[in-house]
């Protein structure tokens, strides 16, 4: 009975989250549509993307963001719209290329992928997959794999398993096409390559960021940050807790709440300068502050795995497969991008949606035509108008027409006076124009309006740190952590310091092994969610 109650409660909460997301999205999207060619967003090599398909995909992404990040603003919609459009165009091209190469996906492929997902959710290998039944489960697990599976596609924004599996089908298609064009047996992996993936050093760090790209003769921000780093190092040598100082000062928000703990790293998981320093250290040693392209680091080595560690024998075979997969996928992505550009050059992609067309024209450098399209969107999409004024303002700023840029941005902030993103953009424009005091005023307005927007606080922290305004940077850091705690955001939330890790940082924990032409990949999302909910997951490749 207890297990059944737990399950019912879980299902009820999932339903409430989904319904809440639906009503928020309905409110955001139930407005007069932008005028365009009837019911068509774009024509991709003869395949039409309809309004219904486009809006369904946008709503799915909005649901996913709301349920995984705990926040959703009107400002997010345009970014999501552009990202979804690009994903749909790529998926359409992927299907076309697969058809040309005679690659198809059958029921057996989908069944195998579903079995893989079930195994990731805890289904024992060889056990028969059950269809979802409310209250199913054997009573030995808090939540049966079939319940987890249903919850999974629900929180990812899919309305049914059928809709979810159609998306998975495109994922399978990419994998089969890449394997046909670039067979893995045509690649080799040396022992030396594999050794670079072995997780040898367990570390924690304190990271201080500043404007590493400053071209001024004297970088005052760097000087202030270096002074602070030296002071922190002196405190550590005097016996102050590393964990406490990391929580107080480190700009790597992905691990500062945990005392700066990163986990086990390998040579491929960090930038070369970082590995060069850390690999020379002894167990228990604390480094002096050292610089990479991401800022100043103070690192403590907690453990060093010996050469004969049995874990390495287990990992070498897995790592070899993943490196082979990465090589194959990298070559396939390069091939896909070449083919994609050929279709673009032949004008085989026609866009009708004014906002997407405006963005495309901007990327092509056709600024005046892009502004004209945004003006059309402003006339017909009143809710989105403030953000189109922002885009116009950005283009004017790039042309150094600061008076026009600030005029557009001011219209935006007056139209939506409670949206922090608009004031943030206004601050950036003032920075570009060299009016720093006005920029700081706008940044402070943005901060005061964004109690739950942890990403905005992270951006402001980086700006203040770059300017050497460490007290303001510290304030934004605290607001970031507070926002994360309030909304219970994912442990994978981006942070200023997290960029020091290379794309291979999570290897060999994931199953996909790298590059994909699909930006909106369900399998990558499943792997992320599975890592973050697994009791045994750690941030590095191993645990203490």
Image (tube, helix red, strand yellow):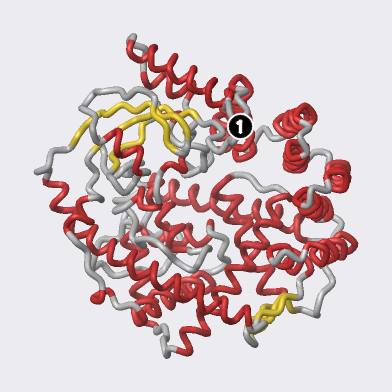
Question: Which quadrant would residue 77 be assigned to in this image?
Answer: bottom right
198 sits left or right of 111 in the view:
left
Q: Nearer the viewer, residue 184 or 528?
A: 184
Relative to the observer, which residue lies in front, 176 or 364?
364
Q: What residue is drawn where x is 40% and y is 56%?
A: 527
Does the image show residue 386? yes
Residue at image mark 1:
216
Looking at the image, the residue that sits furthest to the top is 238
Indicate left or right for 71 with 520 as reference: right
538 relative position to 97: left or right: left
The residue depicted at 44 percent of the width and 14 percent of the height is: 231
Q: Can the viewer see residue 1 in this picture?
A: no
Left or right of 317: which side holds 155? right
> Which residue is pictured at 37% across the width and 64% down the height?
117
The image shows residue 533 at horizontal and vertical percentages of 40, 46
Quadrant in the picture for residue 468: top right
Q: Nearer the viewer, residue 223 or 255?
A: 223
- In what element is the residue under mark 1? loop
In percent of width and height, residue 280 lies at: 23, 32
Q: How many marks?
A: 1
Residue at 60% across, 74% down:
89
83 to 543, vertically: above or below: below
Assess disc 1: are there few (<14), some (14-19) or many (≥20) residues with their C-alpha within 10 Å of its C-alpha. few
Q: Quadrant of the C terminus?
A: top left
Q: Nearer the viewer, residue 214 or 447?
A: 214
Residue 76 place in picture, x, y as percent: 68, 51
In the displayed image of the protein, which residue is found farthest to the front?
Answer: 217
Q: Residue 386 at x, y = what percent?
A: 82, 50
């Amino acid at each position: 009975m207890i297990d059944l109650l737990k399950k019912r409660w879980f299902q009820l909460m999932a339903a409430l989250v989904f319904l809440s997301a639906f009503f928020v999205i309905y409110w955001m999207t139930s407005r007069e549509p932008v005028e365009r060619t009837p019911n068509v967003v774009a024509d991709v090599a003869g395949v039409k993307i309809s309004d219904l398909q486009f809006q369904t995909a946008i709503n799915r992404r909005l649901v996913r963001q709301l349920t995984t990040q705990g926040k959703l603003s009107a400002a997010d919609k345009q970014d999501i719209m552009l990202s979804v459009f690009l994903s749909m165009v790529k998926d359409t091209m992927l299907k076309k290329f697969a058809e040309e190469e005679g690659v198809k996906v059958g029921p057996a492929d989908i069944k195998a992928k579903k079995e893989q997902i079930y195994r990731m959710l805890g289904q024992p290998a060889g056990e028969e997959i059950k269809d979802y039944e409310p209250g199913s489960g054997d009573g030995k697990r808090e939540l049966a794999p079939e319940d987890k599976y249903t919850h999974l596609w629900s929180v990812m924004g899919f309305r049914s398993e059928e809709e979810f599996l159609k998306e998975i089908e495109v994922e399978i298609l990419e994998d089969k096409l890449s394997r046909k064009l670039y067979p893995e047996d045509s690649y080799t992996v040396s022992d030396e390559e594999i050794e670079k993936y072995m997780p040898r050093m367990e570390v924690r760090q304190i990271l201080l960021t500043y404007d590493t790209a400053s071209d001024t003769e004297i970088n005052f921000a760097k000087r202030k940050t270096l002074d602070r780093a030296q002071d922190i190092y002196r405190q550590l040598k005097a016996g102050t807790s590393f964990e406490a100082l990391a929580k107080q000062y480190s700009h790597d928000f992905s691990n500062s709440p945990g005392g700066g703990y990163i986990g086990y790293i390998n040579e491929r998981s960090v930038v070369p300068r970082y590995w060069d320093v850390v690999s020379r250290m002894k167990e228990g040693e604390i480094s002096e502050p050292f610089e990479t392209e991401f800022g100043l680091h103070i690192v403590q080595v907690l453990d060093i795995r010996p050469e004969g560690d049995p874990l390495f024998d287990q990992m070498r075979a897995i790592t070899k497969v993943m490196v082979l997969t990465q090589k194959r996928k990298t070559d396939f992505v390069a091939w896909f991008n070449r083919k994609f550009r050929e279709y673009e050059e032949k004008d085989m992609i026609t866009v009708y949606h004014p906002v997407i067309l405006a963005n495309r024209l901007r990327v092509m450098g056709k600024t005046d035509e892009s502004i004209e399209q945004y003006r059309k969107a402003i006339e017909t999409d009143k809710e989105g108008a403030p953000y189109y004024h922002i885009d116009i303002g950005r283009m004017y700023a790039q042309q150094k027409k600061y008076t026009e840029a600030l005029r557009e941005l001011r219209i935006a902030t007056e139209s939506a006076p409670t949206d922090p993103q608009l004031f943030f953009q206004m601050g950036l424009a003032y920075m570009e124009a060299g009016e720093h005091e006005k920029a700081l005023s706008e940044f402070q307005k943005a901060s005061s309006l964004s109690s739950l927007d942890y990403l905005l606080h992270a951006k402001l922290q980086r700006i203040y740190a770059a300017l050497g305004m460490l007290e303001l940077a510290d304030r934004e850091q605290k607001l970031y952590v507070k926002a994360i705690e309030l909304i219970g955001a994912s442990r994978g939330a981006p942070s200023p310091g997290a960029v020091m890790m290379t794309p291979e940082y999570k290897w060999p924990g994931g199953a996909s092994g790298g590059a994909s032409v699909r930006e909106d990949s369900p399998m990558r999302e499943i792997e992320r969610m599975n890592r973050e909910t697994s009791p045994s997951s750690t941030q590095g490749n191993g645990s203490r």
